[in-house]
Image (cartoon, helix red, strand yellow):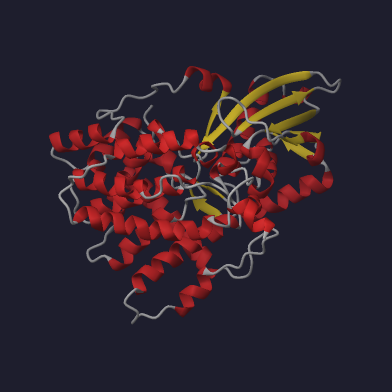
Amino acid sequence: MAVSVFDLFSVGIGPSSSHTVGPMRAAGRFARHLAADGLLPNVARVRVELYGSLGATGAGHGTPGAVVLGLEGSAPETIDPLLAKARVEEVHAGGRLLLAGANTIDFDHAVDIVLSLKAMEFHSNGMVFLAFDGAGDVLSRRVYYSVGGGFVVDEQEAESGPREDATVPYPFNTAAELVRLATDNGCSIAELMARNEAALGREPDLRAGLLRIWTAMRECVEAGLAATGTLPGALKVRRRAHLLAESLDPDDPLYAMDWLTVYALAVNEENAGGGRVVTAPTNGAAGVIPAVLHYYSRFVPGASDDGIVEFLLTAGAIGHLFKANASISGAEVGCQGEVGSACSMAAGGLAAVMGGTPAQVENAAEIGIEHNLGLTCDPVGGLVQIPCIERNAVASVKAITAARMALHGDGTHHVSLDTAIKTMRDTGADMMGKYKETSQGGLALNVVEC
């Protein structure tokens, strides 16, 4: 299935693409289904059952509020984060929900949203939506899965598998195919992606669309740098991006790398606070690519908007490989699928804009994921804060190191990106469930015990 770069980089709100953005989109789909089938006027009550990772950490990830907003017809791409918080509080306090923006129904958050630790068979992030009439009879039941990065599939799509709804001129499902296509056609990976994007037709002006994504990333960094105080939640984590930025010394030989850290912290603190972010490819890993892009834009001589576009297209090609052959869901394969994928995408993108060949880009991407293999997803308190925020900063440094290592070689290396992606998938399958975004193991358990 062809995945557009605009699927991998989409504007939404924090703190989680799979636990906030995805459930909001699923709830919106359910509400639209009720309206399209003419059932909306007869609905007296809805119930939402959240399973697996959603049930375990949904409360800390803002899932119940996201579901409320989606049922009312809001979309993560357009909703104002501040207004969203206020509306969720209104619904919880008043016990009334405006279903699909048209039918006011009673809604008791404590009763109508059910959290279950039981995982559904297809994916850990499973959701069941039910609508009842005034007599208590079920009018409709729909199942959805939030499969990472804000992507949502329903029960039928899960059973039938991905559909080929668009033909692209240069289809690829492996990194080997991608490098061969670029080499045989005498072009860059970004140029191949651009031709495929033209066939998908998601944006009439590809360059302008990608620069809008870059603008959204910059705005997120600016918001994170301006914010102070503590993040929401019981951990009371202090925002550090603003304070660290003020303390940096231009004469420090690692000045640029310190800014890289600041950029990543700014994005992920903004995400943890429920602000507007760009999934890249997820919210939990949203800081890596913007941080490396800011590093490129500010500190690499000759950086340009054309380079930004090339970076995002190249990173998108690599992200497609992870989405197609493994997973970008922490609930499915651990944080190696989120921060690991983002590190790989950023490494490949940076290698490309630094003049790397397709083989060197593949090498950089492989190094980026190889040294994130086995990374668990164990958010303390079910919040996307510890270790998630710092983890993005560390992965940003890894991405630059990976790109530089690859550029000092000729693209020849022992472990292929395809092998590393398969290893990530296999490792995720072997990983115990408590290390996959349930907050039942790892740091999430031991920090609380301490």
**Residue 156 percent coordinates (x, y):** 55, 19
Q: Is residue 394 above or below residue 185?
A: below
Q: How many marks?
A: 0
**Residue 294 percent coordinates (x, y):** 37, 62
Q: Can the viewer see residue 318? A: yes
Query: Going 30% across and 68% down the picture, which residue do you hit?
Result: 299
Residue 158 lies left or right of residue 315; in this view the side is: right
Residue 348 lies left or right of residue 222; in this view the side is: left
**Residue 89 percent coordinates (x, y):** 75, 50
Q: Which of the 4 image quarters holds residue 313?
A: top left
Q: Is residue 332 above or below residue 167?
A: below
Specify the quadrant that holds the N terminus: top left
Specify the quadrant that holds the C terminus: bottom right
Q: Can the viewer see residue 320? A: no
Q: Which of the 4 image quarters holds residue 269?
A: bottom right
Residue 228 lies left or right of residue 50; in this view the side is: left
Query: Going 27% across and 59% down the picture, which residue do you hit?
Result: 304
Camera-nearest residue between 133 and 237: 237
* Residue that lies at the very extreme toward the right in this rendered image: 135
Q: Is residue 393 above or below residue 97?
A: below
Camera-nearest residue between 430 and 16: 430
**Residue 423 percent coordinates (x, y):** 38, 37
Query: Going 39% across and 58% down the picture, which residue do you hit?
Result: 396
Camera-nearest residue between 236 and 439: 439
